[in-house]
Structure formats: structure tokens, C-alpha cells
């Protein structure tokens, strides 16, 4: 009997991985709509995917939260089916030469704050804020979504609103590069830590780097220790050097929050929006990755042409190398063919002299004709130039077929 999953959805190609599980692109069979399908093996002790599906249910219909279409068992796995989104911000950051403009950074900042406020209002903290976990829409490239709630947890009870207890000596949860200083110090995470991580992400986007990136380390623990040491020694002034004063105010405010204190999200958004106005920017959702689409398309076409040219050069190299060996082998074969043909022709000349002597005997004449036919059949017709032309033509046809397949 088919499972509900297999009758409703089809699995496509792998598109990524989360903090647990693998993500595939798929289709909803009835509507033919593209979806994202997150898969987790059922043999795990505690299903993170089942837990994540419940969190998405709590956050449903929120701005910047993708919709869940289905959750359940699929053979020996759990499957979570969601809206298919576009690229993550890390990918878009790379496509923009690893630096966003101030305007784009601020508009991202504003959307991130609104999304995380909604998550916090549902009594949850994310605990893994990073560029990879923020995606744009598949069609609407100006709308940002937050995903991957596998490490999320309640910071307060949803009914009693009792805040979780302050604890120390906790292991680092999340991504070290963007984790808050308190997280590195082993302090239980709360709302303030999500906000500090967002601040690090925005500095990374605008500056193109963070001071604790690319520190040499042999093990994960050594890497975490070096990042922690660098964060401790990096003051807010150093971190925000060259940035508008609002960035410094943001970090000072976030670092001043007590463990269980509710952040003033309106104040933080006002900092960002006032900066947008002061810089004379128009909040038009024209992000760097969708600005000047014609210019962007020209850049893509230029890159495709360059790639095509490189492929053609490589093809020429292969062709020239193979043709050389081919000509060498054919030349060797040609010399052998010439020797064989000369031998056959000499035999034919000798037979001419004997034809008169043999003409009186019909049996001898018949044998002579058979011999001539055999010798003529052993003559080797040879046209290497024509063979090479045919070979080259087939070679280029294969190249064109590969190109057409790639364009599709």
C-alpha cells in the first residue's frame, strides 16, 4: 500500500542540508507545485524534524515564516514538506562580490528584526541565526524568510510565561561565527542572543568580514576557543569601526539587556529606519541582488560566454591531442597499406606476362581471373583526410549537443 507521502509528493534533487536532515526539491503531484522536502531518518533517538514541524505550526501565518504543507512518515524516514524558497543570503552575498551596500544591509536588518520579534512573541528563540538560514522568496526576491528551527527552544512557558532559568557552563549551540559573546561564555541563551547574532550578520554583510574569521585551528574545540578569545578582545568600537553610529548603539543596547529582559524591538527598528532616512535612501526593496536586472543579466550572459569559451578551448586541446594520435596511427597504417598494394600490383604485372602462355588452357585462364580478383580485393582504398574531417564533424556535434542540454 502506498504511503500518504508517495501519493501526494514526488522527490527530486538534493538542494541542501539543515542542522539535521537533508533537503530536497520536490513536487506536489496534484497541483504540480514545487515544494521543499526535508528528510530525517526514523532510527534517530529523538526526532528533531517532528519537533521542528510543531514549531512551524506554532509560527504559522507569520511574516517571514514559510508555510508547512505536510508532515509525516515516508518509508523509513520522516518528511516535512514546505514552500520552496529561493537562494539563501549567503549565496546572494557571494553573487554580489561578498559585500552588500549599506542600503541593502539596512533593509535586511529591518526585516530580520521584524521576523525575530514575531518568533520571540511566540515564546521561542531561534539559536542559530546565520546568513544560510535566511532565504528570499522563489518569486518575490525582496521578501526574506527565516528557516531551520531545529535548534530552537522555548525561552518562556507559552501559558504561564515563566522565563527559563539562568544557567552557566552550557555547550555552544548554533554557529560559532555568529554566536553571541554570552553563548561562548557558556551562558544559557535568551532573546538578547538572537539579536546580537543578527548584529554580527549585518556587520558581516556590510564590511564583508568579521574579525574572528579564518582563524587557523586544527580541531573544532580549538577553533571555538580562538573565536571566543577574539570576540572577548574585540570592543564594540573596534567591531563598528567605519560604520554609522547606529551600529554601535545597537550593540551597546543588546549587550546591556538582562538575561530575561524583553528587548525594545521598536527602538532597534527606529535606529535602522532613522539611519535609512538620514542617508537619503528610499525603502523600495531594491536589494543589491535584484537591482539593475538588465545589468545583472548581462553579467550572467558574459559569465556564460566565458565558460563556453573555456569549454571550447578545452575541447580544442582534446581534439588536437586525439587528432595527433589518430594521424600518427593512420600514417602507420597507410605505410603498411602502400606496401601491401605495391606487392599486389607487382603480382598483377607478373600475371600479365603469363596471360598469353595460359590463354590456351581454359582452366588456367579461370584460375588467373580468380587470382586477379583476389589481388584487386586486397588493394586498400585509403582517404585519411576524409576520415579526419568526419571525425572532427562528429566531435563538434557532440560539443553542440552537450551545450544544448546544458542550456535546457
Image (tube, grey):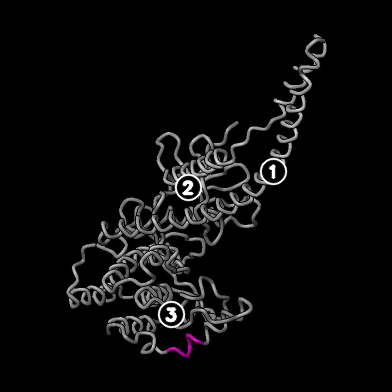
Residue 12 position in % (x across, y down): 51, 44
- Labelled pair 1, 3 in contact (Cβ < 8 Å): no
Task: Find the distance from the CA under tag 2 to the CA under tag 3.
Answer: 32 Å
Is 223 on the left or on the right of 371, as rendered? left
Residue 55 appears in the figure: yes
Task: Find the distance from the CA under tag 1 to the CA under tag 3.
Answer: 69 Å
- Labelled pair 1, 2 in contact (Cβ < 8 Å): no
- Number of callouts: 3
Is 275 on the left or on the right of 188, as rendered? left
- Looking at the rendering, which quadrant does residue 241 occupy? bottom left
Q: Main secondary structure of the magenta part?
A: helix
Residue 25 is marked as 2
Comes first in the chain, label 1 or label 3: 3
Residue 192 appears in the figure: no
Q: What's the residue at 45%, 72% (across, down)?
A: 163
Would you say residue 231 sits in the magenta stretch?
yes
Circle 3 residue:
210
* 295 versus 101 height, above or below: above
In depth, the one of 322 and 94 nearer the eye is 322
Amino acid at each position: 500500500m502506498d504511503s500518504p507521502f508517495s501519493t501526494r509528493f514526488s522527490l527530486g534533487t538534493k538542494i541542501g542540508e539543515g542542522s539535521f536532515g537533508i533537503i530536497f526539491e520536490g513536487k506536489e503531484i496534484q497541483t504540480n507545485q514545487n515544494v521543499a522536502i526535508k528528510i530525517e531518518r526514523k532510527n534517530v533517538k529523538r526526532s528533531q524534524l517532528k519537533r521542528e514541524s510543531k514549531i512551524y505550526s506554532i509560527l504559522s501565518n507569520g511574516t517571514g515564516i514559510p508555510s508547512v504543507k505536510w508532515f509525516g512518515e515516508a518509508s523509513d524516514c520522516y518528511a516535512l514538506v514546505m514552500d520552496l524558497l529561493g537562494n539563501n543570503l549567503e549565496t546572494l552575498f557571494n553573487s554580489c562580490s561578498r559585500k552588500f551596500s549599506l542600503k541593502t544591509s539596512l533593509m535586511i536588518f529591518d526585516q530580520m528584526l521584524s521576523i525575530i520579534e514575531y518568533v520571540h512573541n511566540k515564546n521561542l528563540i531561534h539559536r542559530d541565526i546565520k546568513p544560510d538560514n535566511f532565504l528570499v522568496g522563489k518569486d518575490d526576491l525582496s521578501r526574506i524568510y527565516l528557516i531551520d528551527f531545529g535548534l530552537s527552544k522555548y525561552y518562556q512557558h507559552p501559558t504561564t510565561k515563566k522565563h527559563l532559568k539562568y544557567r552557566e557552563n552550557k555547550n555552544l549551540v548554533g554557529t560559532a561565527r555568529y554566536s553571541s559573546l554570552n553563548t561562548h561564555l557558556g551562558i544559557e541563551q535568551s532573546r538578547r542572543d538572537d539579536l546580537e547574532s543578527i548584529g554580527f550578520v549585518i556587520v558581516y554583510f556590510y564590511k564583508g568580514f568579521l574579525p574572528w574569521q579564518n582563524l587557523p585551528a586544527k580541531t573544532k574545540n580549538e577553533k571555538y576557543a580562538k573565536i571566543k578569545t577574539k570576540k572577548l578582545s574585540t570592543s564594540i568600537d573596534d567591531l563598528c569601526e567605519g560604520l554609522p553610529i547606529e551600529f554601535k548603539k545597537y550593540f551597546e543596547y543588546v549587550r546591556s539587556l538582562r538575561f530575561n529582559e524583553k528587548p525594545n524591538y521598536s527602538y532597534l527598528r527606529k535606529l535602522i529606519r532613522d539611519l535609512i532616512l538620514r542617508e537619503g535612501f528610499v525603502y523600495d526593496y531594491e536589494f543589491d541582488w535584484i537591482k539593475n536586472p538588465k545589468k545583472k543579466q548581462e553579467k550572467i550572459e558574459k559569465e556564460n560566454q566565458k565558460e563556453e569559451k573555456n569549454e571550447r578551448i578545452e575541447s580544442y586541446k582534446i581534439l588536437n591531442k586525439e587528432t595527433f594520435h589518430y594521424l600518427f596511427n593512420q600514417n602507420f597504417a597507410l605505410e603498411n597499406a602502400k606496401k601491401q598494394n605495391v606487392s599486389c600490383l607487382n603480382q598483377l604485372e607478373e600475371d600479365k606476362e603469363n596471360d598469353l602462355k595460359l590463354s590456351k588452357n581454359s582452366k588456367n585462364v579461370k584460375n588467373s581471373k580468380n587470382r586477379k580478383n583476389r589481388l584487386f580485393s586486397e588493394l586498400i582504398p585509403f582517404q585519411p583526410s576524409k576520415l579526419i574531417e568526419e571525425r572532427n564533424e562528429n566531435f563538434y556535434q557532440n560539443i553542440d549537443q552537450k551545450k544544448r542540454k546544458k542550456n535546457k
